[in-house]
Image: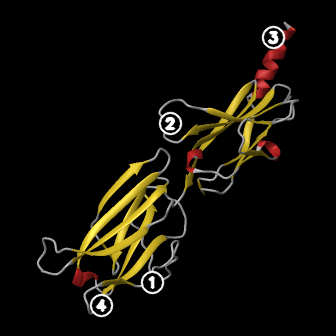
Amino acid sequence: MWGIVLLLYFVTGSRQLSITEFTIPSSVESGEDARLNCKYELTSDESDKALFVKWWWTPLNSTSDERNQLYQRIAGHPAVALHNDIKIEENDSILLLNVTPEDSGTYECEVSNIDEVRKHAELLVFTMGSGPDLNITLVDDGPDADDEDDVLVTCAATDVAPYPDLVIIANGEILPTQESVSSNGSTYDIFASTVLSKDKADGVDISCELYYRDVNVTHSPYVDTQTFYVDQSGKAEHGSALSLLLVIAAFTFVFWL
């Protein structure tokens, strides 16, 4: 009889358990650290003798119920990190060290004291990879109204995450492009191209901007810009390329608006 009463006491008390602080960054740039916080609260009449705290991770776009345990602390025992690239901090917080796109996914904190509570959120690790690489060349005249050579504009980036897009812009105008994207698992390679008539490209600032599709990630613009012109001999030349991660004060392009 006393055993049943005691069990009911613990079960009733454990239902008061709550996670009072849970924070996970929505996005982190590859190579940085990500801090995951999880704090719980017991009522004054609760015991922590049966308490444990665990962190779990489910990879992004997992095709199965792949759920990996990263951390565990059982009352009365030292906390244990079950992953090499994790630093244990105070109050069951953990620090993911030098994250990569492979670390993207859903992170969950589980606190149990007979009963249990859980909270989870998604962490996205982004990277520009090789960054946009713009190339502009003269090519033979194509099927257009003039007899002049055309200008082929290509742009590429490799090992980008998450899913990317490339936009080619001339004199502030977004140009129609042919684009291809291939997956490397957790990263992507992307290539885009367009053709301009020579008179529309000569003396024009041409830019290629890399961004992420359908994802709200805050970062400096990833842009490569060149000024294209044709000299008196008809040879194509490029002005100085602007560096990647260019912050354009006078021009802000938001493709999804």
In the foreground, 238 or 244: 238
Tell me the distance, in whole angstroms, between the alpha carbons under discs 4 and 2. Answer: 54 Å
Q: Is residue 51 visible?
A: yes
Instruction: Indicate the colouring scheme.
Output: secondary structure
Kindly indicate whether the residue at mark 2 contacts the one at mark 4 (C-beta within 8 angstroms).
no
Q: Position of residue 142 (x, y in %)?
A: 16, 71
Dot 4 or dot 1, earlier in sequence:
4
Dot 3 or dot 1, earlier in sequence:
3
Q: Is residue 80 left or right of residue 162?
A: right
Q: Amino acid at mark 4?
A: Asp
Label 4: which secondary element: loop
Kindly indicate whether the residue at mark 2 contacts the one at mark 3 (C-beta within 8 angstroms).
no
Instruction: Please give the residue where the numbered disc 2 appears in the rendered image.
Output: 62
| Circle on res. 4 | 3
Q: Position of residue 147 (x, y in %)?
A: 12, 80
Instruction: Please give the residue where the numbered disc 1 appears in the rendered image.
Output: 240
Tell me the distance, in whole angstroms, between the alpha carbons under discs 4 and 3. Answer: 93 Å
Q: Amino acid at mark 3?
A: Ile
Q: Amino acid at mark 2?
A: Ser
Label 1: which secondary element: loop
Q: Residues within 10 Å of mark 3 (few under 14, many from 20)?
A: few
Q: Residue at x 50, y 81 (%)?
A: 249
Dot 1 or dot 2, earlier in sequence:
2
> In the image, which is nearer the foreground, mark 4 or mark 3?
4
Tell me the distance, in whole angstroms, between the alpha carbons under discs 1 and 2. Answer: 44 Å
